[in-house]
Each structure stands twice: as C-alpha cells, then as structure tokens.
Amino acid sequence: MKIIEQMVQDADDRFWGLLGCKLIEATDNKVTVSMIAEKKHTNSMGIVHGGVLSSLMDQTMGMVAVARKQIDNCVTTNLNVHYLAPMHEGELLVTAEVIHEAGRSLTTRAEVKNADGVLGCMATASFRLVVPKK
C-alpha cells in the first residue's frame, strides 16, 4: 500500500516514532503494526500504560481508514477502548480492520496482543475522512 508506506516513511519524527511503531502488513482492509514495549511505556504498576495501548490502536485504525479510501488524512471522532489483560514489556502486535463505511465516515476495530497471543485490549473507533479542498 503506497499511501501507508509514505505515511510510515514520514512518521519517524512524529508520535509514531515516539511510540516505536513498525509496520508489519497493510492492505486496504487490514493493517498490522508492532512495537516493542519498554520500561518507558509502562505505568507505576509496571504494565504498559493504557494511553500507550489506546494510542497504538488509534494510530493503526487511522492507518487502515486512509488505506481503505486511499486518502492522506482522517481524524478520530470516537474511540472506545476495552482493557482486558495487562500487557508487559516486549513485543506488542496491533491489528486493525474496517468494519463499516458510510459516506465520509469509517468505523474500525483493533486488537492488541502480546507475543504469546494474549489479547490485552480491543477498541472500535470512528473516523472522519479529510477530503482535500479543490
């Protein structure tokens, strides 16, 4: 997916790079991203901070939204997160897919799993597509 590859290429000095994300796979309906959770990503309990997990899912769901429509931008209008199991330092994989389209809005779903396949959290999000002005 050319649009996703360009997005990743331009993102190292943005929030994507701060999180330490890496693109694993991208199609027009599914994007998979990984990151290595380090101590700096954890909270005072020693588990990955919920803000890191929600940001990781939001980022990946936004990517699948732009991939689906082959546009440059979208904005999150709603994000629902369910934390299911604590995630610890190590590799995390997030997969996002489009589950509904309506005009300039898309609804997506994401899951974060650790390297052992444990489901740590899931989310749904709605995105408003930003259509360039002519």
Image (cartoon, rainbow, N blue to C red):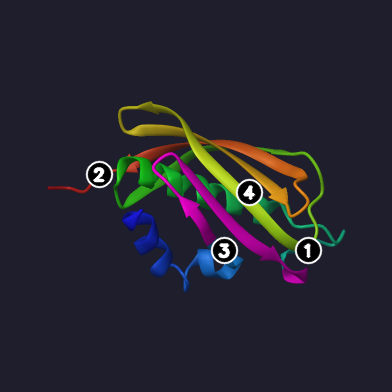
Closer to the eye: label 4 or 1: 1
Q: Magenta segment, which residues? A: 23-40
To which residue does mark 4 refer?
A: 54
Do we see residue 48 in this rendering?
yes
Residue at position x 40%, y 69% from top?
9
In the image, taking residue 39 as reference, residue 20 lies left or right, namely left
Q: Is residue 68 above or below residue 24?
A: above
To which residue does mark 1 refer?
A: 89
Q: CA distance from mark 3 to mark 1?
A: 14 Å
Report helix, strand or loop for mark 4: helix
Report helix, strand or loop for mark 3: strand
Looking at the picture, how far across and down is residue 30, in whole percent? Answer: 48, 42
Q: Earlier in the sequence, mark 3 or mark 1?
A: 3
Cβ–Cβ under 8 Å for marks 4 and 1: no
Amino acid type indicated by mark 4 = Ser
To which residue does mark 3 refer?
A: 21
Amino acid type indicated by mark 3 = Cys
Residue at position x 30%, y 28% from top?
103
Amino acid type indicated by mark 1 = Glu
Most extreme residue toward the right is 45
Closer to the eye: label 3 or 4: 3
Do we see residue 80 in this rendering?
no
Q: Earlier in the sequence, mark 4 or mark 1?
A: 4
Q: Earlier in the sequence, mark 3 or mark 2?
A: 3
Looking at the picture, how far across and down is residue 131, in whole percent? Answer: 25, 44
